[in-house]
Image (cartoon, helix red, strand yellow):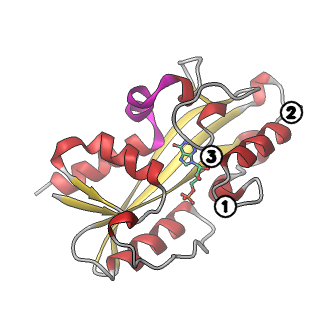
Amino acid sequence: MTLIIATRNQHKSEEIRQMLGDAFVVKDATDYPDWPEVAETGTTFLENATLKAEAISALVEGYVLSDDSGLEVDALHGAPGVWSSSYGGKEGDHPRNNARLLEEMKQVPEELRSARFVCTMVIAQGGKSLVHFVGRVEGKILNSASGAQGFGYDPLFAPFGYGKSFAELGSAIKNSLSHRGRALAQVVDWLQTP
Ligand code: IMP
């Protein structure tokens, strides 16, 4: 089965590709250079994921999957949330995003550093959303960046029970418990249910 991912974020499509394995051919914006930029004007993960999936599925045949995701930090009242990608001031600038998060969390004690990654995935076809799924992983924000794997906030986020950041744990462990992995498992169930 072919699954078209409505994203320009290569990190997301690479993780999805790794998790789906050989059962699916995964395509993304690199296979469709003419895709328009879809403005993420929503205020929730679901609104933004729906905007992306519906816009792109109106242009291609078959199922389109979108992923809108981010980090919710309790001590920051849920920020950066849907604005995770531009938290440092510039869209997709991960070092600046991480620097701002560390700065905002500077005075926050250990017991108040809880956070979660959230991923909402929407499947759409022919310009219409069909279904959506949400995955979450709970953890805490570290006091400094640790590890070199993954992307985004991975060096600052340690899932509960592991004592290491996603960037230290590596892709196999991250994918087995991540927000994206948990949302994608539900997507696969839905796609494979006759
Ligand atoms: P989106 O493209 O609007 O969904 O933005 C997602 C942003 O959330 C990314 O740019 C990262 O800052 C953050 N993010 C989402 N998923 C992850 C992850 O798995 N690891 C680290 N950061 C993530």
Q: CA distance from mark 2 to mark 3?
A: 17 Å
Sequence-first tag of 1 and 2: 1
Residue 124 locus on image (x, y percent): 32, 71
Q: Main secondary structure of the magenta part?
A: helix
Task: List the single residue furthest toward the right.
Answer: 107
Q: Please provide the residue range marked out in magenta.
A: 169-179
Label 3 near ligand 1 (CB < 8 Å): yes
Label 3 crowd bin: few (<14), some (14–19), many (20+), radius 10 Å: many
Residue hosting label 2: 106
* Residue 44 higher or lower than 70, as above or below: below
The reply to whether dot 1 and dot 3 touch (C-beta < 8 Å) is no
Label 2 crowd bin: few (<14), some (14–19), many (20+), radius 10 Å: few
Residue hosting label 1: 91
Sequence-first tag of 1 and 3: 3
Residue 158 locus on image (x, y percent): 60, 27
* Residue 43 higher or lower than 169, as above or below: below
Instruction: Residue 140: name its quadrant.
Output: top right
Q: CA distance from mark 1 to mark 2?
A: 23 Å
Could you say which is closer to the camera, residue 134 or residue 84? 84
Residue hosting label 3: 71
As helix, strand or loop, the secondary structure at mark 2 comes to loop
As helix, strand or loop, the secondary structure at mark 1 comes to loop
* Residue 21 higher or lower than 47, as above or below: above
Q: Residue at x 73, y 54 (%)?
A: 87
Q: Residue at x 70, y 29 (%)?
A: 145
Q: Residue at x 45, y 53 (%)?
A: 10
Q: Is residue 164 left or right of residue 5?
A: right
Q: Which residue type does callout 3 highlight?
A: Leu
